[in-house]
Amino acid sequence: MDKYNSRATIKNTTFFSTFTTTNTEGKTILSYRSKRWVVIIAIHLLFFLSFHIDIQMLEGTLTGSRFLGFHLIDVFTTMQLFLATHKLPVNMIIGTVTIVVVYLIIGGRTYCAWVCPYGLLSEVGEKIHNTLVQKQMIKEHEFDHRVRYVFWAIFLVLALSSGYLVFETFNVVGILSRFIAYGWSIALVWVLAVLAVEIFFSRRAWCRYVCPIGTTYGLLGPLSATRIEWNDNCDHCMVCHDVCFEHQVLELTKAKYDKEREEKGIKRQYVTGADCTLCGRCVDVCHEDALNFKFRLESLV
């Protein structure tokens, strides 16, 4: 996809063309989407190989694992377990702190875009969904994105009141991660059901409105060192809004804020919304290079 010579949006470009983009010299390079897919596949290939041929590099699943002996525990899992049992083993504390530090550096919901296996399925489902909407075969259904905090609270209350990690029964991320590492499970039917909802009813519904894992990492987002940076090269074409399933985080790209920015002398701003997954899709399509990854602590390094 040549972002400099066309303003192709998610609605009128082919899915596979989004795996490449162009640089300022006109050369075709890998897009951030393709880089993310490579990272996700590599992570889960390590899970698979560690179990099946015992290479012991990345053992376990995304819920809880060990990387070269270092414990890594999903933050929301730790929260549920503490509420359900009122205690935490030392290894879980160490693993959770490690994960928190990592995502404070690389970006809170980076987990969603660069680690989560369901994200790959959901991106394919998103393309099918948008095609069906464009052909007027289905209607788009959008809801207030803040409903995710309601689900987040419900699952925590259920853990506290039941003494059981209720969310893990419905966790499509955990189900897929266990399937990749260990093999077939009837629970995959639930994953397909969720994907069907996203295809035929609401774009990226699980990620946008339900998943408490993404919500938890999102709370780290505004504090994280890695963010998307906007600059005033922006011509407000809004293509970035088309490709971003959490487009509310790109509110700052709208022209209505230009006067206020001009008065304050603001030429650059960070996308600081908790919902940003740092997937890089906005960077891939911006023909003015007004959106880029930025490590906020680089001046201190």
Image: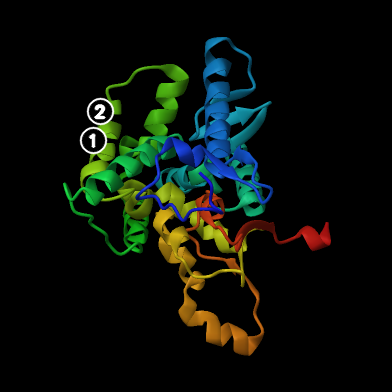
Which residue was labeled with disc 1?
Answer: 193
93 left or right, relative to 199: right
Q: Neighbour class for label 1 at 10 Å: few (<14), some, many (≥20)?
A: few
Which residue was labeled with disc 2?
Answer: 189
Residue located 63% across and 18% down the image: 56
Q: Is residue 149 visible?
A: yes
Estimate the spatial distance between the alpha carbons at disc 1 and disc 2, rounded to whole Å.
Answer: 6 Å
Quarter of the rendering containing residue 174: top left
Up the image or down, 238 lies above or below 17; here it is below
Residue closer to the observer: 63 or 244: 244
Q: Residue 210: x percent and y percent?
A: 33, 51
Q: Amino acid at mark 2?
A: Val
Residue located 44% across and 47% down the image: 213
Contact check, label 1 and label 2, Cβ < 8 Å? yes
Q: Neighbour class for label 2 at 10 Å: few (<14), some, many (≥20)?
A: few
22 left or right, relative to 188: right
Q: How is the image coloured?
A: rainbow
Residue located 48% across and 45% down the image: 112
Residue closer to the observer: 157 or 99: 99
Q: Is residue 87 visible?
A: no
Quadrant where the C terminus is found in the figure: bottom right
